[in-house]
């Protein structure tokens, strides 16, 4: 199995190459050494250069097609690029080659979640959490909560989301997802409170503004609901939510309960 050296070792190698080594020799070594290609891909990934990272790791796969770590890395790159189908395929390949790669399982769970397959996502997230050595469990727990929410299991979702909140209350979209879970349970006061917290973090989130307005409407707080319906129209005037907000505001009673 490959020695997965960190990217800084690769950088050091360049500095200590003898003066007689040309740039062409270094480039040739990089293009034909799977370990160096992997290190270069990780370095580019850390710098946010997804294109270079993909080029390097694809070359490594050309040289050693059945290295699980390379396919795991490519799966992560494709996820970060928003290509979830390719991410799923690469993560699958990595896990077939090495079922113990928990990072690949977590990435596959994210791909499943974004592809609208929450049942498979739940299974991968639960297996990821079961790995005692996996270090990033807070985000996994949050994502598990979303997978449960997408299966219309809001009570179970809340259990996972509150555990994630306890560990890290600043997770992005946390309060939006808590609001969704409470809304699904008919807890409109708690839903409103969480949507409001989410808006305080991201005041231009028209989806949360719309959900907040509808929850306030159900609580018969129509003047306040109208305020947030207007916010939806201001921030996302072409959205379907803005169209519905206009209909609500144009009714005889202002924001009418539904």
Image (cartoon, rainbow, N blue to C red):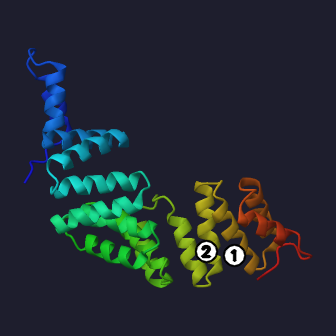
Image position of 50 (left or right of 202): left
Q: Using the image as rendered, state which of residue 84 and residue 226 is in the foreground.
A: 84
Q: Using the image as rendered, state which of residue 61 and residue 159 is in the foreground.
A: 61
Q: Using the image as rendered, state which of residue 194 and residue 126 is in the foreground.
A: 126
Describe the element under mark 2 as helix, strand or loop.
helix
Nearest to N terminus: mark 2 or mark 1: 2
Residue at 57% x, 72% y is 179
Residue 118: give x, y in percent of width and height: 42, 76
Residue at 76% x, 83% y is 258
Residue 228 visible within the image: yes
Image position of 174 (left or right of 43): right
User: Label 1, on which residue?
Assistant: 215
Note whether 143 is above or below 87 in the view shown. Answer: below
Residue 254: name its quadrant. Answer: bottom right
Note whether 51 is above or below 75 in the view shown. Answer: above
Query: Going by the picture, which residue comes out furthest to the front?
Result: 62
User: Label 2, on which residue?
Assistant: 191
Image position of 195 (left or right of 144): right
Residue at 11% x, 23% y is 16
Residue 137 visible within the image: no
Residue 240: give x, y in percent of width and height: 72, 65
Disc 2/disc 1 C-alpha distance (Å): 7 Å
Tell me whether circle 2 and circle 1 mark residues in contact (CB < 8 Å). yes
Query: Going by the picture, which residue comes out furthest to the top?
Result: 19
Q: Using the image as rendered, state which of residue 76 and residue 172 is in the foreground.
A: 76
Residue at 54% x, 66% y is 175
């Amino acid at each position: 199995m490959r020695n997965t050296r960190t990217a800084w070792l690769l950088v050091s190698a360049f500095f200590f190459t003898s003066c007689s080594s040309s740039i062409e020799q270094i480039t040739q070594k990089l293009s034909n050494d799977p370990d160096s290609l992997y290190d270069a891909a990780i370095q580019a990934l850390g710098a946010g250069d997804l294109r270079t990272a993909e080029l390097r790791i694809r070359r490594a796969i050309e040289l050693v097609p059945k290295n699980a770590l390379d396919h795991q890395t490519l799966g992560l790159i494709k996820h970060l690029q928003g290509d979830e189908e390719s991410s799923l395929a690469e993560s699958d390949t990595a896990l077939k080659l090495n079922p113990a790669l928990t990072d690949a399982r977590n990435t596959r769970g994210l791909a499943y979640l974004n592809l609208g397959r929450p049942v498979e996502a739940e299974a991968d997230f639960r297996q990821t959490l079961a790995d005692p050595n996996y270090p990033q469990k807070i985000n996994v727990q949050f994502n598990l909560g979303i997978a449960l929410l997408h299966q219309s299991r809001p009570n179970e979702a809340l259990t996972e989301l509150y555990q994630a909140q306890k560990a890290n209350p600043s997770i992005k979209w946390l309060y939006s997802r808590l609001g969704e879970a409470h809304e699904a349970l008919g807890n409109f006061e708690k839903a409103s409170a969480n949507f409001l917290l989410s808006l305080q973090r991201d005041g231009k989130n028209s989806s949360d503004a719309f959900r907040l307005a509808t929850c306030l409407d159900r609580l018969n707080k129509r003047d306040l609901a109208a305020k947030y319906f207007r916010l939806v129209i201001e921030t996302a005037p072409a959205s379907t939510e803005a169209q519905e907000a206009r209909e609500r505001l144009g009714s005889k009673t202002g924001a009418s309960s539904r």
